[in-house]
Image (spheres, rainbow, N blue to C red):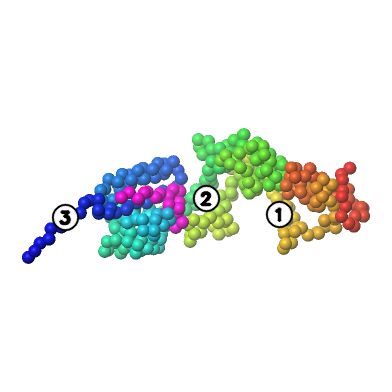
């Protein structure tokens, strides 16, 4: 019998496994951020310390629920696997990889077909092993049920706090208030000046778009250091907290849509606390602003047809022309329910676009205007 001697292949000729790790934390807190940094460093040491592994990176998502499939780093990792650039993914546990059983199994099966395994450290499961998928299915269902149970417990705890009249609010993004050592809302006087200004100017018929333009022009930043948006101001003007009240459970999360928040229109119990804290504006002023907002909404809905153009709802609609820009005047109910006609350019774009003109409706009574007419205030 002849025996052929085969020389041992050099170590460099054996391809190493291309190994990456996946980590996830569900909040953006500093504590969680530190945890993510520690996990990333630990995985890098683990992979680089194995002579059979080639380090292929660490993919880490922060502040994203495991129920969400569209996690940026998670999807980037899958794309690399589909491109044939990975052999093994290491992750701490099934719940870190995904909270949804369907997502876990779907991803594991796709990766298995690509020849890429997932190793779950806590469960000691490798999806490429014979019984790996069966064990994974069982444990993933347990992980999903555990998460659902924790979510229900959290909802119950929050509900009990609401029933006791205990509000939950972060003042990090809330202009006008801070929290004291007891967690109570206290007025931030510097920010409160902005709040009062917004309420006062709105009653002077300065709309949300013009208010945001004004604050940005003056260099006033939001509490997060950003630019003002009309939607932000609209939300502030309708916020009952500025008159000292607290409406709890204005929004809720449907059981079947864990990452979706819906406005509460009676689907779940809500709670209203009057005189919960010191107001920044009086209840009377707050109420007047709500009436003004409702009126503007009504006028906006009535005044536009299907094409988005204003209809001739009043006899003089479309007839009065601004002497400065040549655009038509619009009928508006201003402070204390006075009726005036204002330049449409001024209304939409502010003083920068046109200095504007105001004509009292009472001053037009008895005038025979049958065609477009340029008008001036006397």
Q: Secondary structure at mark 3?
A: loop
Check residue 349 for magenta coloring.
Answer: no
Label disc, if present, on residue 163 of the rendered structure: 2
Identify the mark nearer the N-term, 1 or 2.
2
> Between 45 and 281, which is closer to the camera in this rendering?
45
Q: Position of residue 259 (x, y in %)?
A: 49, 56
Q: Position of residue 179 (x, y in %)?
A: 54, 38
Q: Which residue is mark 3?
A: 7
Tell me if mark 3 has few (under 14), some (14-19) or many (20+) residues whose alpha carbon lies within 10 angstroms of its own.
few
Which region is colored magenta?
54-74
- Would you identify the image quadrant in which residue 33 lies? top left
Image marks 1 and 3: residues in contact by CB distance under 8 Å: no
Compared to residue 303, the image places residue 363 above or below, namely above
Label disc, if present, on residue 282 of the rendered structure: none
Label disc, if present, on residue 297 of the rendered structure: 1
Image marks 2 and 3: residues in contact by CB distance under 8 Å: no
Residue 267 in view: yes
Tell me if mark 1 has few (under 14), some (14-19) or many (20+) residues whose alpha carbon lies within 10 angstroms of its own.
few
Q: Secondary structure at mark 2?
A: helix
Name the residue furthest top: 190
Identify the mark nearer the N-term, 1 or 3.
3
């Amino acid at each position: 019998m002849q025996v052929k001697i085969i020389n041992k292949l050099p170590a460099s000729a054996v391809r190493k496994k291309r190994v990456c790790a996946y980590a996830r934390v569900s909040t953006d807190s500093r504590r969680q951020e530190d945890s993510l940094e520690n996990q990333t460093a630990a995985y890098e040491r683990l992979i680089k310390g194995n002579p059979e592994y080639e380090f292929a990176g660490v993919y880490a998502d922060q502040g994203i629920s495991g129920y969400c499939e569209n996690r940026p780093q998670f999807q980037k990792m899958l794309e690399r696997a589909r491109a044939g650039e990975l052999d093994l993914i290491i992750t701490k546990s099934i719940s870190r990889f995904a909270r949804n059983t369907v997502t876990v199994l779907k991803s594991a099966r796709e990766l298995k077909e690509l020849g890429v395994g997932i190793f779950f450290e806590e469960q000691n499961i490798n999806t490429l092993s014979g019984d790996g998928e069966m064990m994974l299915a069982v444990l993933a269902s347990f992980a999903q049920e555990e998460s659902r149970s924790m979510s229900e417990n959290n909802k119950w705890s929050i509900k009990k706090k609401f029933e006791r009249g205990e509000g939950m609010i972060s003042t990090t993004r809330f202009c006008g208030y801070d929290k004291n050592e007891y967690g109570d809302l206290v007025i931030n006087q510097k920010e409160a000046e902005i709040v009062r200004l917004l309420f006062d100017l709105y009653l002077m018929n300065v709309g949300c778009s013009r208010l945001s333009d004004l604050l940005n022009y003056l260099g006033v930043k939001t509490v997060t250091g950003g630019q003002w948006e009309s939607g932000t101001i609209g939300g502030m003007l309708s916020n009952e907290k500025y008159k000292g009240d607290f409406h709890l459970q204005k929004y809720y999360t449907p059981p079947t849509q864990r990452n979706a928040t819906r406005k509460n229109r009676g689907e779940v119990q809500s709670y209203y606390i009057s005189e919960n804290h010191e107001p920044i504006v009086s209840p009377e002023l707050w109420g007047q602003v709500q009436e003004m907002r409702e009126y503007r909404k009504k006028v906006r809905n009535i005044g536009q047809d299907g094409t988005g153009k204003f209809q001739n709802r009043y006899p003089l609609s479309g007839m009065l022309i601004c002497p400065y820009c040549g655009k038509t005047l619009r009928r508006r109910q201003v402070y204390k329910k006075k009726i005036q006609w204002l330049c449409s350019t001024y209304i939409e774009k502010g003083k920068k676009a046109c200095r504007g003109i105001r004509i009292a409706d009472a001053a037009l009574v008895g005038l025979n205007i049958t065609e477009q007419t340029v008008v001036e205030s006397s």
